[in-house]
Image: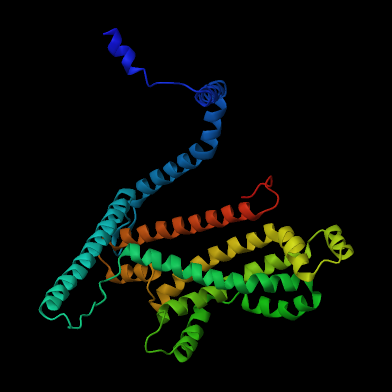
Amino acid sequence: MNTRVASMFNGFKLNKSDFNALSKLTSLMTHIKHNWDDYIRSTMRVAGVPIAAFLVFLGFWAASASQIETSLGVVPGPSAVWKQFTVLISEHNEEREKEVGFYQRQEKRNAKKLAKNPDAKVKIRQYTGKPTFIDQVFTSIGTVLIGFAFASIIAIPVGILCGLSTTMYRALNPLIQIFKPVSPLAWLPIVTMIVSALYVSDDPMFAKSFVTSAITVTLCCMWPTIINTTVGVASIDKDLVNVSRVLRLHWATHIFKIVLPSSVPMMFAGLRVSLGIGWMVLIAAEMLAQNPGLGKFVWDEFQNGSSNSLARIMVAVFVIGLVGFALDRIMLLIQRSVSWDKTADIR
């Protein structure tokens, strides 16, 4: 017996690195033990308070929903909305299974055709099933990101020019102030007509609905970025500007080494506002123009008028809010990564 036990540990050896790792783990456990109360308080501040607030909201919603009667029935509570969310996920999975089966049947038919005649021409037809709720979520996300990207490409250079040159600011500021408050509902018909007239192709790379929605997002969400970038550039510390003049930095070096790092906080404040506006604009544009996306899903459910429509619309509302929140957090992470002051409190 002793021989068997000894043989079990013959290959077990500890080297110096193992002892170092063990000592670090022991030190960490000791630190957690001594600071356990601080960890609990920190966790409650970060996660506990928001969770408690959300639970209170759910309780208020569940208690008041059944008291409100609409043309589509009683306002659904949290459980009814969650049920419809699971139904939408199931419908998406079923649609994907149909798509896979559609292509598999084509492959079998083409394989039989080629077996009979190796020179036969075969075609792969695209699946044209109805887009699901999940499909429309990703359609809207892709559209808003493209529109926001084009808006940023335009807005950041314009904001830098306006911040560096008083003449440029005086020239462009009236146009900015005129177009800034224009509603997407006013831009959409104009953009639709222009795209229909200019974007003519037998085999277009992008659908006209996508181009129309993306341009509308671009036109509506660039203004906060222009304004905030202008303010950020104009507010650069004069000492930094004077140092740049003394060193006779090239204009490109001045912009990338002095202007951009100093204006990052204000610039990203504008980018985050622009992205939020772009997301709201897109939903409204999709509803009005019936372009594919979450806005069209909401409008179709409203027109459907079934007993489950209101719950499905509320699912879309929560998803719209969660996606907007996620996009803002992503912009916050990007801001923290590019900001030169890592100690700044960025919220």
Percent x, y of residue 277: 54, 66
The answer to whether 31 appears left or right of 61 in the picture is right
Picture residue at 52% right of the left edge, 73% below the top: 217
Q: Is residue 192 above or below residue 258?
A: below
Q: Is residue 227 above or below residue 190?
A: above
Q: Is residue 18 above or below residue 73?
A: above
Report the quarter where the N terminus lies: top left
Residue 233 visible in this rendered orientation of the protein: yes
Q: Closest to the observer: 148 or 67?
A: 148
Percent x, y of residue 64: 37, 49
In the image as oriented, which residue stretches furthest toward the left? 116
Q: Closest to the observer: 189 or 120?
A: 120
Query: Which quadrant of the figure has residue 202?
Result: bottom left
Percent x, y of residue 258: 77, 61
Color style of the picture: rainbow
The answer to whether 117 appears left or right of 179 in the picture is left
Percent x, y of residue 184: 52, 76
Q: Closest to the observer: 296 or 58?
A: 296
Query: Which quadrant of the figure has residue 156?
Result: bottom right
Picture residue at 86% right of the left edge, 60% below the top: 243
Q: Closest to the observer: 16 or 299?
A: 16
Picture residue at 78% right of the left edge, 70% below the top: 251
Picture residue at 36% right of the left edge, 46% below the top: 63
Query: Which quadrant of the figure has residue 110?
Result: bottom left
In the image as oriented, which residue stretches furthest toward the right? 246
The answer to whether 11 appears left or right of 153 in the picture is left
Residue 307 visible in this rendered orientation of the protein: no
The answer to whether 250 appears left or right of 15 in the picture is right
Question: How many numbered discs sit on the rendered protein?
Answer: 0
